[in-house]
Image (cartoon, helix red, strand yellow):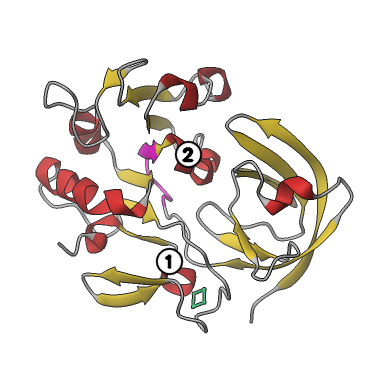
Amino acid sequence: MVKQQQATLTRVYPLPPFWAADFALAHPPTPGKFVLAELGGALREPLYPAGLAEAQFTTLVRPHHPVTQLLPGATVDVLGPLGHGFEIEGAQRLLLVAEALWLPPLLPLLEAAPNVALVIEATTRALLPSPTRIPPAVELHLITQDGSAGHLGTLEQGHDNDTPLRELLPWAERACFACDPVRYPALARLVRETRLHPGADFAQALVQMPLPCGVGACEVCRVMTRHGERRACVDGPVFDLLALDVT
Ligand code: FES
């Protein structure tokens, strides 16, 4: 049965390029799962945890998101936790891969394994998060499409036909991705090129999209996979990356 809870906003503040909102919530979602929040619009909004603590979570949203209009102390009706999240239990070497603007749901995993490598791609330096916000134990690799910071190129390909992922994918025991879903087929092909027999749970990809009902009723969140059509709200939003390559 879907849980209905009351979340209380304790703080909202700019954290460029995002806004951060701290909520007190008895049962917060684990990484990759979400709650559906009633924020006054026509549809509920999915909120993913970008930081977690006992009975509270922080979510990062884009500027002008309805959460940024709330005042501290506001009570928000939420459904959830919902969905299928990241599964990394037991991994010693964890690889996190994100486009900068899609990164927040991976942030709760930065200390989820003894060895964590994080690869972030942005079009330009100004869109990268400050390295001071990343724990020093995390091995950080930056990629910019204009070469203004880190490696020049994209997640899939550097300017010299290379990318940090070619070394890090064979190193990792689990890899979690948070990108625009249009990138996933090419990233799945890169996984296949660099790993001989990647298991079904090796590469896990979060598909972020509108999730109006969250319970499999409206069919707005259909995702095509190698196993047929799936619904992001109940079968995901974390999927096997390799199953998302339907080309
Ligand atoms: S959000 Fe309605 S079916 Fe998934």
Classify 10 Å Cα crowding around label 2: few (below 14), some (14-19), many (20 and above).
some
**Relative horizontal placement of residue 78, taking residue 158 as reference (left or right):** right
- Distance from Cα at disc 2 to Cα at disc 1: 20 Å
Classify 10 Å Cα crowding around label 1: few (below 14), some (14-19), many (20 and above).
many
Q: Which residue lies under the disc numbered 1?
A: 236
Contact, CB < 8 Å: mark 2 with mark 1? Answer: no
For badge 1, the amino acid type reads: Gly
The span shown in magenta is: 88-98
Query: Residue 159 at x, y = what percent?
Result: 17, 22
Query: Residue 107 at x, y = what percent?
Result: 53, 39
Q: Residue, x 30% and y 17% (percent of image)?
A: 147
Q: Residue, x 27% and y 34% (percent of image)?
A: 155
Residue 146 visible? The answer is: yes
Q: Which residue lies under the disc numbered 2?
A: 101
Q: Residue, x 64% and y 70% (percent of image)?
A: 43
Of the 4 image quadrants, the one containing the C terminus is bottom left
Of the 4 image quadrants, the one containing the N terminus is bottom right
